[in-house]
Amino acid sequence: MLTKNDILSTIEMIDQQHLDIRTITMGISLTDCADASAARACDKIYDKITRYAKNLVSVGEQIEVEFGIPIVNKRISVTPIALVAAASETADYVPFCKALDRAAKECGVDYLGGFSALVQKGMTKADEKLIRSIPEALASTDVVCSSVNVGSTKAGINMDAVRLMGRVIRETAERTNGAGCCKLVVFCNAVEDNPFMAGAFHGVGEPEKVINVGVSGPGVVHHALQSVKGAPFDVVAETIKRTAFRITRVGQLVALEASKRLDTPFGIVDLSLAPTPAVGDSVARILEEMGLETCGTHGTTAALALLNDAVKKGGVMASSSVGGLSGAFIPVSEDEGMIAAAKAGVLTLEKLEAMTCVCSVGLDMIAVPGDTSAETISAIIADEAAIGMVNSKTTAVRVLPAIGKTIGDTVEMGGLMGSAPVMPVHTASSAAFIARGGRIPAPMQSLKN
């Protein structure tokens, strides 16, 4: 039962500490939209999305007003389009992306995810068609996001897909002046119920439609830790757990209310700490509050491991169903503390890679020099996929080749995407390594049956 103090505390979190619901995401199955005619399939996709999600934005806005809880984004995720388009007799999958874009705009949502392919063990003809269409698809649409899963603990890493994705990211950057790469992510161990972009898609094991909610609140955790300065780490962990519980309860409330009003089953609450460029809403500042002078210095990985674990432990007790990614995100361009640490030269690509071993996702929203080769991008993807594969966790790469820019320049994306300093990458070639292709076999820990 809520007490007066609980209510006042929640009001303070929203009003002064940047607590928000980052997204309400409606997942929609499009498997029944498959058709031999690509045009008919696109019409079915548009009709189904606009029918199911027509009230998503208005319901989200009603909940915001009635409960006083900011909901930053309303989003849609759909079945990976490579699975739906496979039935169509066409070599061009760009019209599918355009149909998604039209439907998303008709519904008024901020983003739609699911122009995706799952190729961890190999590529079908449909998968390859979709992947090769990504640069044109993202260049000709506005709110559609794309993802490709290239590896898993069970299957290993599809290095042919990794090689191809390096070229696709490079071409997307050139076609969109880098902006399209903000909407493109490469996964290992992708999850089926992730409400966060750019990696959201509606997995084949999901129901016909579902409501997933992603919460945020780095500012709330940062504020809570200010009350335990100098305390031992077990006190720090308990403080974060209690705070994560409170944050997640807000997400559970919104999720259940949205589920009821939209007559759509509740799926999960993703209790990730997702930062924004706003001062006071930074994961990096949480780590610095633990005693680090600058995020990225020695001790950062340990601090992030504590934070990620405590967030999960606190949140899992607060919701009937926790899922998605859940933990702490470290997107450089979207976190003002990360931006500052990168500009200072303390936070490097190598340190970020180490941090991804213990955080929720991976190398996220990182600007690299515009002349970075496709092979180097592929090698970065391979490294990150290996971390995910061996550690049985989700990892991802969302890098932004900054066309025409070099180390030390700044790339401005605006809004939640923020800005990013262009970070150095190694200049020694990985081309011969990437050229091998084939598949890196699954590790021993995949043999669990």
Image (spheres, grey):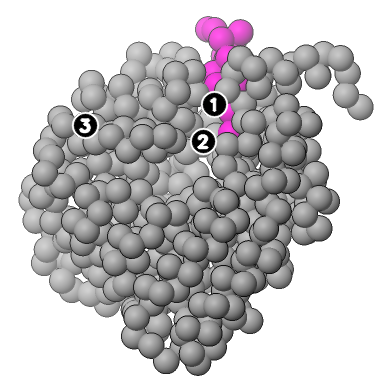
Tag 1 residue: 218
- Circles 2 and 1 in contact, beta carbons < 8 Å: yes
* Residue, disc 3: 410
Q: Which residue is drawn at the image coordinates 32% and 38% (left, top)?
A: 413
- For label 1, count other residues whose C-alpha is less than 10 Å away and answer few (under 14), some (14-19) or many (20+): many
| Residue 9 rendering spot, x and y as whole percentages | 74, 16
SS class of the residue under badge 3? Answer: strand
Q: Secondary structure at mark 2?
A: loop
Q: Which quadrant does the C terminus fall into?
A: bottom right
| Residue situated in front as seen by the camera: 283 or 65 | 65
Q: Is residue 55 above or below residue 341?
A: below
What amino acid does circle 3 point to? Thr
Residue situated furthest left in the rendering? 428
Specify start and end residues of the magenta stretch as a single range. Answer: 216-233
Dot 3 crowding, Cα within 10 Å, few <14, some 14–19, many 20+: some
Of the image marks 1 and 3, the number of the one nearer the N terminus: 1
The amino acid beneath tag 1 is Pro
List the single residue furthest toward the right.
1
